[in-house]
Amino acid sequence: MRSFVWVLLVLFGLFAAVATAHFVVDYRAQITQRDTSELLNVELARRAIVDDIGAVTTDLTFLGRLLENLDFDAIGSGRRDPTIARIFTTFARQKGIYDQVRFLDQRGYEVVRVNLQGRDVVLVDDAALQDKSARYYVNKASGLAPGQVYLSPLDLNVEDGVIEVPLKPVLRFVTPVFDRAGQRRGLVILNYLGERLLRRFRGAAANIADHIEMVNGDGYWLSSPRVHEAWGFMLGREETYGDRFPASWRRIREGANGQFGNDDGLFTFATVRPSVEAAELLQTGQVPSTHGEVWKVIAHERPSEGIAAFAQFAARNATPYLGTSVLLVGLAYLLAAARVHRRAAEAERAYEHRFRRTLEDIGLVALMVDLQGRLVFCNRFLLDLTGWRRDEVIGSDWIDRFLPDDQRAAANELHRVLQQNGDYPAVREGEICTRDGERRLIAWNNTPTREAGGRLLGLTAIGEDITEQRIAENQVRQLSRAVEQSPASVVITDRQGCIEYVNPKFSAVTGYSFDEVRGKNPRMLKSGETPAAEYGEMWKALSEGGEWRGEFHNRRKDGSLYWEAAVISAVRDADGNTTHFLAVKEDITERKQLQQEIDERNLELARSRALAAMGRMASMLAHDLANPLSSVKMAVQILGRQAAGDEARELSEIGLEQVHYMEAIIADMLTYARPGELDCKWLDASKMLVGVAGTVHRRMTEYGVALDMQCAPGLPSFPGDPAKLRQLLSNLLMNALQATAVRAVGERYVSLQADLTETHAGRRLTIQVCDNGQGIDEQVRDRLFEPFFTTRSKGTGLGLAIVRQIADLHGADVALVAREPVGTCAVLTLPLTPPVSGSTHRGAAAAPEES
């Protein structure tokens, strides 16, 4: 028994030694995996910050170089320059990431400031511009040389001495502006929204978001998983990272990057010097080192509990250890050792897999090339962008496969330097070719790849496709020049119709300068000549997101009227929301005047010829046909009274009807050719309509037509010639009666309505005569008022021509419109004041006629 116990103790001692060794190796592997992941995520977070700083620095230097080419002679102290304002407004709208874009003169006064409010870009009025000469970033940047950039500390935005709420982190980028003569003209300042930088920082390290932090050089939190800790140095909270972890903070503050552990846990950190990162994009020495701020990216993992780790280990390995302890202790030791090595290899492969997975999922171009320039890895983003398959590009020469011919020599030279010295530009821009030959511009961030021993393996590059961004920048410049030089007037308003921009042609046409119309509505040009319905149709089209084309009769600054043809359309943002309205207008005053003169002369000539012809014809008919027709009429009447049979009387009635028809034709021609003068009297509308309805009532009854008459109560008296107006309305009623012939008896319907309406010319009496006939083709509707034009087999085509003639004598309007669902309406609109003409209107001031 004692031997058994001793052997058993030896076996359990071996078993315990093997289990303990296994646990230690397993625990260290877990720690190694964790440490590697912490380092990777901290580096990704640091690189996200560096990328943002580089992008903003590029934008700032782009604006600085653009402004250096302007003519500053016209820019006085405190006076806004419209060119700078347009450039800043367009730039801020395109970028959408800057809280403020400003230009300060040499005294520190704001000359132009563009604010980002939500999704809108607002050009600040002159009265709201401020003196910033006392702000620290203005003083710091006042001594910068050409091309130098100053980066302010990342802090909360302060307006009028008060921290803006909600909190708005801001990082200010400042560069001086010099004119062509080398004279300092002021400062360009970009207020970069720090929240975007912090979001990208947190997103890049999303895997460790619960314990990654960023602090400034004094240890105050700029970003923390515990929201209440951030911005303590501005909100009166004095606790710092050094107060919480004194010993750890000293090591972090003194080191550039690294990883260490102590009683407080595992600390992984990296340093970001914004000014230094910006300097790498500029020429050497462009950012003074004394202006540098330090940020620390810190991942803090709490100390792990050994007991909990052992419990997890035991739970994972209880069954195999129990079995192997009973059967083969020695084999168990070998299996445990093999398992340790296997897990270490798996951890290494898992790390490599996670690293590649991170690059695979990132929304940027990512690739690795070896020292021979062969592509050993590329992510899906690059394949989707270029159209290649993975098996077609892996192992192929990167430069020959993807770079344009004109850039290969430079790329080969850079790769030769990498092979010899291990150096490669950290940031550069270059084009790549897709499978279809399309060129895409990429902004690269490059890092030489080295193994653990430091041996150079190749190059890792992460890039952003900036093709559309660069195209947009070029389009902005081209569009600005095209609009400024356009021969047409160009007006841009916001959604409320307030003017934000006009080009020089607008000022030349209207006489108003840009400063006079900025912020005002284009209705200031209205003359009252354009109908209100025209504006209604315009706003209806624009509110539906469409385009409106039409003409305006507007008034210049000097009071003179002018015509312009306009094309107005809505400007939409990326989400399809209307943000502005764009109007392109052409002065057509001379064209309208010429066309009006031509139309008036043609109309006058046509009328003169028609009336002359009608006069001659009417005289001939009156002389040659009137007397014979009277004799024929008398004879037919006598024969009708003496006729013995029904057939003879019927023939006599037919002959008499045709004589009446010929008399009516002669009467219409005489009426149209010799309209005569108006004999105006004040008429009662209701009584006149009742009288006219009575004269046609018999004919309506004969044809089986139902006549419905409706007069609005309280219709006023109006001036007119009673005889002519009765003839006009009778003609319209007879036309309506004849139009119902297509309906069966009992279904024929004619209505006579009168009411007051409001028009742009004032109150008018509107009379409508409607039928339920088959309607009139739109192509011939307007021609029905022409003399001798008719769609019927019988008739002279003078009935409606006489209607139009009588209406014109009264200064009235008459038109034919479609009736819903079927039929036609004749609409007569009469003025309530006496017509003005060369005729003598007798009785215009008399009492209303009893019609």
Image (tube, rainbow, N blue to C red):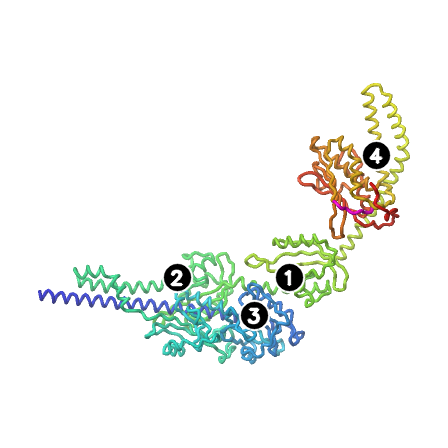
Amino acid under disc 2? Arg
Residue at disc 4, secondary structure: helix
Q: Residue furthest front?
A: 714
Residue position marked by numbered label 3 in the rendering: 100
The reply, left or right, for residue 692 in relation to residue 489 is right
Per the image, the residue denoted by label 1 is: 493
Marks 4/3: CA distance? 83 Å
**Tag 3: residue type?**
Gln
Q: Is residue 220 visible?
A: yes
Q: Quadrant of the C terminus?
A: top right
Residue at (42, 72) in percent of width and height: 297
Residue reaching furthest to the top: 644
Instruction: Tell me where residue 607 appears, x and y as whole percent.
Output: 83, 45
Q: Is residue 607 left or right of residue 385?
A: right
Query: Mark 4 or 1, which is nearer the eye?
Result: 4
Assign a secondary structure to mark 2.
Answer: helix
Q: Answer with mark 4 or mark 2, whichever residue precedes in sequence.
A: 2
Q: Which residue is mark 4?
A: 664
Against 118, residue 541 (above or below) is above
Residue position for label 2? 357
